[in-house]
Amino acid sequence: MDVKLAQRMQFSTTWIDLDKLVRKHPSGSLRFTRGLKEKQKLPVVVSAHFRPKRNKNGHRSVSLEVLFSHKNFPATVLESGSFHVSSDESLILKNRSEEVGPYINGRCIYLVGMMGSGKTTVGKILSQVLGYSFCDCDTLVEQELDGTSVAEIFKLYGEGFFRNKETEALRKLSMMHRLVVSTGGGAVIQPINWKYMQKGISIWLDVPLEALAQRIAAVGTNSRPLLHHESGDEYSKVFRRLSILLEERGECYANANARVSLEKIAAKLGYRDVSSITPTAIAIEALEQIEISRGRGGHCL
Ligand SMILES: Nc1ncnc2c1ncn2[C@@H]1O[C@H](COP(=O)(O)OP(=O)(O)O)[C@@H](O)[C@H]1O
Ligand SMILES: O=C(O)C1=C[C@@H](OP(=O)(O)O)[C@@H](O)[C@H](O)C1
């Protein structure tokens, strides 16, 4: 189907903006009754079925079928075809940031979540679209200690020392504006850190354990000292260790102002697997959840 035709279809005097339609109803079908332009006397039912798919490159395409039916006629396919919506996500992200930007109003955004939940990846996207700076709290701690890596800090001085440095870094960040901060996965366990993060807006990236373990197993555990103690194959040991940490921390993450659940995004977009969700789609959901948390007075859980 011609892309222009697919993106804006006219039935009677009503334009359907498929871009908006797909955004609002990521998959499914829509039925509406209209009199066709030339034959206003004949009411017909027009149904649009659309189903987004993602190809190997992460580009989405939407297949669409428009059916005409009337009690006296068998259902007939008026139009069918598919179109790409790959650039769609960046546009949606931009629109969302313009909508929610005034509410955020320069406050820092703190991304919290388990190791590997995408705080750095999604944080960079959010900072870019909002025109904020990005800051990785672990990197700040490392800089304070002349570039000593987090893994080395744990080895040389222990976890307690690292946690104090992390709190100190968050205290400094809480005095700043227009920052998206990727916090360390364990920052949520110290109540004092929430006092600092409450000056801004906190978002929990809630990612299923299987996906976290897959991501971390793919890059290795060198930079994540809390995952060094287990034996076995990489995926299983990361999974076991993360399960224990999540059990201890689950409630702490729930203190965040907004929660971005990858399982919910997958359900919304009609994906079976959370690994199909792009970081941009997660950033879009983060902005949407900030907007929703506004209606709840800033607290989501
Ligand atoms: N949505 C995603 N889909 C697939 N892989 C991702 C996604 N987000 C992040 N990753 C990958 O997971 C790993 C951990 O991501 P990162 O952003 O560093 O997490 P965190 O900062 O929370 O520890 C990286 O290798 C990154 O490329
Ligand atoms: O979960 C944790 O306790 C930790 C997470 C790490 O940050 P990332 O979440 O960025 O990996 C880092 O702060 C340190 O290894 C401890």
Image (spheres, rainbow, N blue to C red):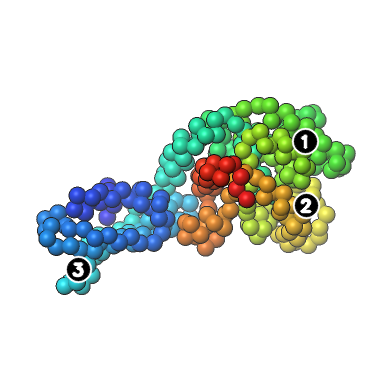
Determine the secondary structure under disc 2.
helix
- In the rendered view, would you say 68 is above or below 37? below
Residue visible at 68% across and 27% down? 175
Query: Among all residues in the image, which is located at the extreme right?
Result: 157
Of 96 and 237, the residue lying toward us = 96
Tag 1: Cα neighbours inside 10 Å, few (<14), some, or many (≥20)? many
Reading the image, the residue beneath label 1 is: 167
Reading the image, the residue beneath label 3 is: 70
Q: Amino acid at mark 2?
A: Leu
Give the mark nearest the N terminus, 3 or 1. Answer: 3
Residue visible at 66% across and 54% down? 212
Give the mark nearest the N terminus, 2 or 3. Answer: 3
- Comparing marks 2 and 3, which lies closer to the viewer? 3
Give the mark nearest the N terminus, 2 or 1. Answer: 1
Labels 2 and 3 touching (C-beta < 8 A): no
Question: Residue 79, percent across and down?
Answer: 25, 60
Q: Amino acid at mark 1?
A: Thr
Reading the image, the residue beneath label 2 is: 227
- Comparing marks 2 and 1, which lies closer to the viewer? 1
Quadrant position of residue 257: top right
Residue visible at 58% across and 37% down? 124
Q: CA distance from mark 2 to mark 1?
A: 21 Å
Can residue 87 be seen at all in this image of the molecule? yes
| Quadrant occupied by the N terminus | bottom left
